[in-house]
Image (tube, rainbow, N blue to C red):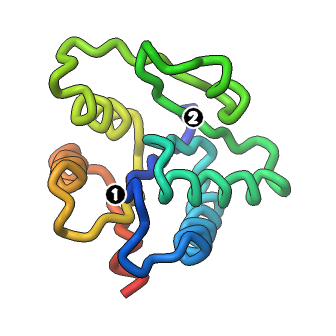
Amino acid sequence: MTNKTCCFFGLKNLGNGVRRDTAFWLAKQQIQILIEDGYTDFIFSGEGDFDNSSRMALISAKQKDKHLKQIYYAYPYEDKVILGRKYDEVRILSLAEPDNSSLNRMQIIIDNSNTCVFYIPNSKVISNKAIKYAKEKGKKIINLVDIDS
């Protein structure tokens, strides 16, 4: 049986009046809903403000549910030792087109997820490409900006 997997994408810098504690609370609430729906694997897309808030929310949930797994897709040049201390599993990407590596990474993460949780206002171009790609792939999409409004 394959584990249900969710990925997280959001703003690198939460600025614009969005507080980290708000992002943490929204992510924690959504993670709990996903856990209740049988999700066990959670993929984080980077080290930005939203990613870190979401990861901290999952760490909080892991105190009760030890079987939950944090997964990170690393570029080949990233420090695997440091990442291995922060995540339960680090998967190394093999990127064929380095010029588009951010977009390729997002697509790989989305391809390996059942649901995608975003915290992205409509103005962020590359992130909008991720949402569009997730829709094309038939993934369940949750944008926490809509919930926060």
The N terminus sits in image quarter: top right
Q: Nearer the viewer, mark 1 or mark 2?
A: 2
For this view, does 60 lie left or right of residue 80?
Answer: right
Look at the numbered disc 1 and give the secondary structure of its residue: strand
Rounded to the nearest whole Å, what is the CA distance between mark 1 and mark 2?
19 Å
Residue in the image at 46% along x and 28% along y: 73
The C terminus sits in image quarter: bottom left
For disc 1, the neighbor class at 10 Å (few under 14, some 14 to 19, many from 20) is few
Task: Name the spot of residue 26 as percent of width and height, x first.
Answer: 54, 73
Hey, what amino acid is under mark 1? Lys
For this view, does 11 lie left or right of residue 100?
Answer: right
Residue in the image at 66% along x and 60% along y: 57
Q: Could you say which quadrant of the image residue 67 lies in?
A: top right
Question: Which is more N-terminal, label 2 or label 1?
Answer: 2
For this view, does 144 lie left or right of residue 56?
Answer: left
Hey, what amino acid is under mark 2? Ile
| Residue placed under numbered mark 1 in the picture | 140
- 93 or 13: nearer the viewer: 13
Placement of 66 over or under 60, stated as above or below: above
Task: Name the spot of residue 99 as percent of width and height, x first.
Answer: 16, 23
Q: Which mark is residue 71?
A: 2
Residue in the image at 37% along x and 35% along y: 109
Placement of 95 over or under 1, stated as above or below: above
> Does the image show residue 33?
no
Task: Name the spot of residue 145 as percent of width and height, x first.
Answer: 36, 75
Look at the numbered disc 2 and give the secondary structure of its residue: strand
Placement of 15 over or under 113, stated as above or below: below
Task: Name the spot of residue 47 as percent of width and height, x first.
Answer: 50, 44
> Does the image show residue 112?
yes
